[in-house]
Image: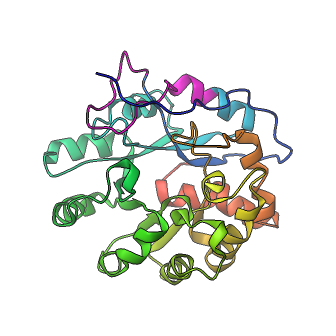
Amino acid sequence: MTKPSCMPPDNNTRTPRFVAPPNSCDAHCHVFGPHAQFPYAETATYWPPDAGKDALKRVHDKLGIERAVLVQASCHGRDNRAMMDAIASSNGAYRGVCMADDTFTDNDFQDLHEGGVRGIRCNFVTHLGGAPNLEMMARVLERVKQYGWHLVIHVNAEDIIKYEDFFNRIDMTIVVDHMGRVPTSEGVGQQAYQILLEFMRRKSWWVKVCGSERIAMAPPFYDAVPYAQGLVELAPDRVLWGTDYPHPNIKKHMPNDADLLDLVPLIARDEATQKKILVDNPARLYGFDD
């Protein structure tokens, strides 16, 4: 059985103009496969081209990125083995965000934590299967609180609006992927972005200023910058940055990851804030050792 694929990443990573500070972290990236070793989930809506830990390391070496947070993607479903293998081989440079449900045992969660997982991701995006069972999600979140994990939510703009009340009831740290995927074509006054700003006024909320290539209308993705700037200016101590390599399900404009890193000095316009986003904030949230 095979599933629809998606565009491969641009692995011809150029040298970025922006020089990342030491210990910079890509706080949102993935490892896919290799499929022969770590099969994709039968329930996944897509099976991407392989992009394993070695490919990810080559991209980071070119960008000057030393740390990473690997985020479990829906193509692997709740089989976190590819991510855990990459973390184990990183010599302490990687952490992880898993996917899980209430079939996981206490030992399963303990093994994930000891292996470097520090968060759990829940997907609400329709093209990846839509929202989880909210009662089950709440049960799982209660079980992982003992590890100090946070919740990562992958949402579209309409999900921010639809599930606003549900998210407000969650009593743990929440990290929003890809700036909530709010489309730049709708302007900064759009309801979803304004709700996201309200979320970010709370000390328990974080956001990733990644996914510019997903919310912008076209390269070089500059129309995403004001959205990221607004989030950084509001909560500079609770913002993360990431590449989203290998960029699954991009429909039109596959980015070069150097172009995305070169957005950082536009998003965060002084060196102190750049260091917060790339080094200090991920180190604090994920427990990296300096």
Q: List x then y, in percent, for residue 39.
A: 33, 24
**Residue at image x 76%, y 50%?**
219
* Residue 279 visible to the viewer: yes
- 197 relative to 88 in the view: left or right: right
Instruction: Pick the residue in front: 211 or 89.
Output: 211
In the image, residue 271 above or below residue 242: below
Q: List x then y, in percent, for residue 7.
A: 57, 32
Q: List x then y, in percent, for residue 15.
A: 82, 35
- 193 relative to 269 in the view: left or right: left
Q: Which residues, given as a range, are shown in magenta?
A: 34-57
User: In the picture, which quadrant includes the N terminus?
Assistant: top left
**Residue at image x 37%, y 33%?**
84
**Residue at image x 80%, y 59%?**
265
| 6 magenta-colored | no
- 90 relative to 25 in the view: left or right: left
- What main secondary structure does the magenta stretch of the protein show? loop
* Residue 21 visible to the viewer: no
In the image, residue 204 above or below residue 35: below
Question: Which residue of the protein is positioned furthest toward the top in this rendering?
Answer: 36
Q: List x then y, in percent, for residue 64.
A: 73, 38
Q: Quadrant of residue 150?
A: bottom left
- 183 relative to 128 in the view: left or right: right
